[in-house]
Structures are given as structure tokens and as C-alpha cells.
Image (cartoon, rainbow, N blue to C red):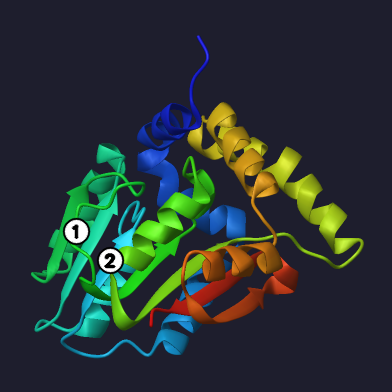
């Protein structure tokens, strides 16, 4: 029976939740940690503010935001995979963070009022949603005027030679890592498909503007294999 993108993605993340963090480090050679650290530096998150991490997965970025806003701030993490959220809950509890709330929900229809958050983030999740623009518009809706929305995501390298090597790695090597380390060849095949089909950084910047964001900043990482898109809400 044919599965929708939403159904397929849900099944993938429910199945790989126990291995997700380990595989992220293997697949990106731990570069994703440096990328997120640089994004956080650019965001300049202030104490006492309110943040939302969309498609939060196992809550790594949620936790980083919670530590940045401090105990007087508040951070929500939202994901539609309950298994991923369970892993995230364990991490939050282990760190003794009381300013975090993880929610089972859908990025396509965020369960928050307009103008709720100073910061809204999505890390390596936008490529997995059924409709990119719907999610970007939802993130814009719940961002406060003057607030920041940020996407950190895989991108499309433009350097000839490196681009071809990147696609070879994603198509053949990454699923093999999934099979060897997580017994999940099919799931990691899906992840390389979603990365390959995701818009390039210029196209995504235009989508940010179309969703209503202004002063959009783009920062590529590691020859363009990933990119940050940061936009402000008027």
C-alpha cells in the first residue's frame, strides 16, 4: 500500500530513535555539533526568553536553547515521533532542566497562538515535512514581531567534484552505515532521498521571504553540505 510522505517519515523516525544520536554523529563526522554551535552564536539567545524547537527529535537543540534562556526562560520542543520524544525526555531529565516541555505534535499545524515565541528553530527536520512552505508559514505565525526563526538543514553543495562526491556518499555510503550500525538500511535510504530532493540554499532563502520573513541571512557550512537560514519577523 502506498504511504504518504508523512506516514513514511513517521515510520522512519519511530524505528531509528534508539540509534538516531549515534548515527547523526557518524553521518556528519560530528560536524553538526559545530554547525549548531555557530548558529546559536549568531542567534545570540537572551536569558528569560521563550523558544520553540520544531521537529525537535531527541531534543539536542531544545536543550541547548533551554540552557541559553536559563531557568527564567521557557523552551518547547515539538515532534510527531513519540519514540524520539522519549529519548529527548530522558536527556532533559538527566540534565535537571525544568524549563523544557516536550510536546507530541505536527509541524504543519503548530498548537500555539500567534506571536508566542522570541526564537523558533528547526534543525534537520524541514526536509522531512510534507509541505515546506506550510511549516515556514506556521513558524512565522508563532514568532513574535522582532523575533527570529532559524532553519539548520542539509543543503546542496555547488562546488564541482565535491557535489558529486557528496551525492555518492549520501546515496551509497550513508545507507550502508545505517545497515551496519543501526540495522536500518531502508530508513537511511529515505534520509538520503529527502536530503537530495531538498531545495538549495538560494531557493530556501526565497521561501523564507515568501513566508513573510525579512532580512534573511544564509550561512553555508562545510562546502555547502548544510546551511543556516535565519529570518526576522516584522
At horizontal 48% and vertical 25% (from top left) the residue drawn is 4
Look at mark 1 in the image and give the residue it sits on: 112
Taking 51 as reference, is 202 left or right? Answer: right
Q: Residues within 10 Å of mark 2 (few under 14, many from 20)?
A: many
Look at mark 2 in the image and give the residue it sits on: 142
At horizontal 64% and vertical 37% (from top left) the residue drawn is 175
Quadrant in which residue 150 is drawn: bottom left
Label pair 1/2, CB-CB below 8 angstroms: yes
Residue 202 percent across, percent down from the top left: 70, 68
Secondary element under disc 2, as helix, strand or loop, is helix
Taking 37 as reference, is 75 left or right? Answer: left
Secondary element under disc 1, as helix, strand or loop, is loop
Compared with 119, 121 (above or below) is above
Is tag 1's residue or tag 2's residue first in the polypeptide sequence?
A: 1
Residue 20 percent across, percent down from the top left: 43, 47
Residue 163 percent across, percent down from the top left: 83, 59
Amino acid at each position: 500500500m502506498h504511504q504518504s510522505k508523512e506516514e513514511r517519515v513517521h515510520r522512519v523516525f519511530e524505528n531509528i530513535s534508539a540509534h538516531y544520536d549515534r548515527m547523526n554523529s557518524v553521518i556528519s563526522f560530528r560536524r553538526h555539533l559545530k554547525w549548531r554551535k555557530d548558529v546559536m552564536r549568531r542567534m545570540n539567545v537572551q536569558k528569560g526568553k521563550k523558544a520553540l524547537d520544531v521537529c525537535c527529535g531527541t531534543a539536542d537543540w531544545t536543550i541547548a536553547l533551554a540552557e541559553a534562556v536559563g531557568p527564567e526562560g521557557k523552551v518547547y520542543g515539538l515532534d510527531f515521533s513519540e519514540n524520539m520524544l522519549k529519548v529527548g525526555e530522558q536527556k532533559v531529565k538527566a540534565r535537571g532542566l525544568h524549563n523544557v516541555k516536550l510536546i507530541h505534535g505536527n509541524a504543519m499545524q503548530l498548537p500555539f497562538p500567534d506571536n508566542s515565541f522570541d526564537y523558533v528553530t528547526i534543525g534537520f527536520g524541514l526536509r522531512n515535512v510534507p509541505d515546506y512552505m506550510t511549516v515556514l508559514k506556521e513558524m512565522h505565525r508563532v514568532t513574535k514581531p522582532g523575533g527570529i526563526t532559524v532553519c539548520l538543514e542539509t543543503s546542496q553543495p555547488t562546488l564541482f567534484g565535491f557535489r558529486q562526491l557528496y551525492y555518492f556518499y549520501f546515496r551509497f555510503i550513508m545507507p550502508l552505515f545505517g545497515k551496519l550500525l543501526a540495522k536500518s538500511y531502508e530508513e537511511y535510504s529515505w534520509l538520503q532521498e529527502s536530503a537530495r530532493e531538498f531545495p538549495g540554499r538560494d531557493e530556501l532563502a526565497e521561501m523564507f521571504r515568501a513566508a513573510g520573513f525579512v532580512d534573511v541571512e544564509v550561512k553555508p557550512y562545510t562546502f555547502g553540505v548544510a546551511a543556516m537560514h535565519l529570518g526576522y519577523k516584522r
